[in-house]
């Protein structure tokens, strides 16, 4: 099957094909079709279903170009996933503002605390006032610390906010980070390669993503480096611009590791640091980089600080009772 499109000139053509025809290359790789742009014609050749899917994506690119917008890589990959699932959003979704240029959306969080994510019809909602305050802190600050016991949604809501920002074009990349610290077991005794040993520590972040995106969508974003899930040790020496970076289980960082992590923040980026001060697995709990940073940076302007408690637990009702029975110590241990 073959389908042809008329190509505009100038900026509108570049918005359709992408720099160095990057958009056409992504369509070609994702859908297995032949795509070429010659003179004023864009030609798609391949299996009927794949050509139809590719045509949907090209139409979205051209809709955006006519509106004076450019779809970023994240939005193009979203369109490819939607087309492959036969659930491409209507053209109005392009006009609604999912452009590659970061937006100053004054209210990305709905009044009921809901966030749009990639799964069709799926919205992630804050279920307590504390959780809503946490989401607003992430929106309002470039660096946010959140302390709280298990089950309060520290990690889940941070990932939801990150996915929402990626979808809106407010950031270009998500970086999800965890320290690989053993809770009573040694990595060396686990089977497999070092990557196999590290993967269990990163699994909770991937579980949260699977609640908000289709599996092939996640695979595509990771393949194109729009989503990265890495151990903390691999962050040294990097600077991340236009990215939202989440450090989970930060109570298990040392003070030097926390300093290393916080200095990775680049221009146009955001960071969220989460942890539970009652579950420090370091040999010396007083060395926790999270507790040190939470107090050390309390007077630094532009930093958000949230403390969730047992009232914010949204897992099984017994989790709240267990936390209360153990006398959670997740609140900051001292005040200056």
Image (spheres, rainbow, N blue to C red):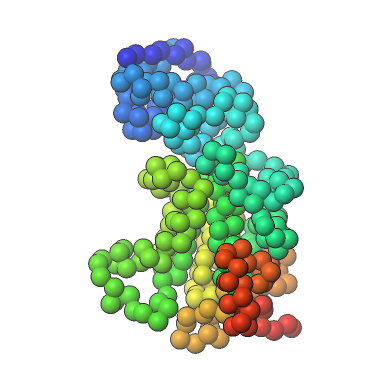
Which quadrant: the C terminus? bottom right
Residue at left 69%, top 48%? Answer: 109
Q: Is residue 70 above or below residue 260?
A: above
Q: Position of residue 105 (x, y in %)?
A: 69, 42
Q: Position of residue 28 (x, y in %)?
A: 34, 28
> 252 or 292, which is in the foreground?
252
Q: Is residue 224 above or below residue 262?
A: above
Q: Is residue 325 left or right of residue 224?
A: right
Q: Is residue 109 left or right of residue 86?
A: right
Q: Is residue 246 above or below residue 250?
A: above
> 13 or 5, which is in the foreground?
5
Q: Is residue 191 visible?
A: yes
Residue at left 50%, top 75%? Answer: 253
Q: Position of residue 38 (x, y in %)?
A: 38, 15
Residue at left 52%, top 66%? Answer: 248
Which quadrant: the N terminus? top left
- Tell which residue pokes out farthest to the left in this image: 192
The answer to which quarter of the image holds residue 183 is bottom left
Residue at left 49%, top 87%? Answer: 284
Q: Is residue 269 visible?
A: no
Count of marks placed on residues: 0
Q: Is residue 331 left or right of residue 118?
A: right
Q: Position of residue 259 (x, y in %)?
A: 54, 72
């Amino acid at each position: 099957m073959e389908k042809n499109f008329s190509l505009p000139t100038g900026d509108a053509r570049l918005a359709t094909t992408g720099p160095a025809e990057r958009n056409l290359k992504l369509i070609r790789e994702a859908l297995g079709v032949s795509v070429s742009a010659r003179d004023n014609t864009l030609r798609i050749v391949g299996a009927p279903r794949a050509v139809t899917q590719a045509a949907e994506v090209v139409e979205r690119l051209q809709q955006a170009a006519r509106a004076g917008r450019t779809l970023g890589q994240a939005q193009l990959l979203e369109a490819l996933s939607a087309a492959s699932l036969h659930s491409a959003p209507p053209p109005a979704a392009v006009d609604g503002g999912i452009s590659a240029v970061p937006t100053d959306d004054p209210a990305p969080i709905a009044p009921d605390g809901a966030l749009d994510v990639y799964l069709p019809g799926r919205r992630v909602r804050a279920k307590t006032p504390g959780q809503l305050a946490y989401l607003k802190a992430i929106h309002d600050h470039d660096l946010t610390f959140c302390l709280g016991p298990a089950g309060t949604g520290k990690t889940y809501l941070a990932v939801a906010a990150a996915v929402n920002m990626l979808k809106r074009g407010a950031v270009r990349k998500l970086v999800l980070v965890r320290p690989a610290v053993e809770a009573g077991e040694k990595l060396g005794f686990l089977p497999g390669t070092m990557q196999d040993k590290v993967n269990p520590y990163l699994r909770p972040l991937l579980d949260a993503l699977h609640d908000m995106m289709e599996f092939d969508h996640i695979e595509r974003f990771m393949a194109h480096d729009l989503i990265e899930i890495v151990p903390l040790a691999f962050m040294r020496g990097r600077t991340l611009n236009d990215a939202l970076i989440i450090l989970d289980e930060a109570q298990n960082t040392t003070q030097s590791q926390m300093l290393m992590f916080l200095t990775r923040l680049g221009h146009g980026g955001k960071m969220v640091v989460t942890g539970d001060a009652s579950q420090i697995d370091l040999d010396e709990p007083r060395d926790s980089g999270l507790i040190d940073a939470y107090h050390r940076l309390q007077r630094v302007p532009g930093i958000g600080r949230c403390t969730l408690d047992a009232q914010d637990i949204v897992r099984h009702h017994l989790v709240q009772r267990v936390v209360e029975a153990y006398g959670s110590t997740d609140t900051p241990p001292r005040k200056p």
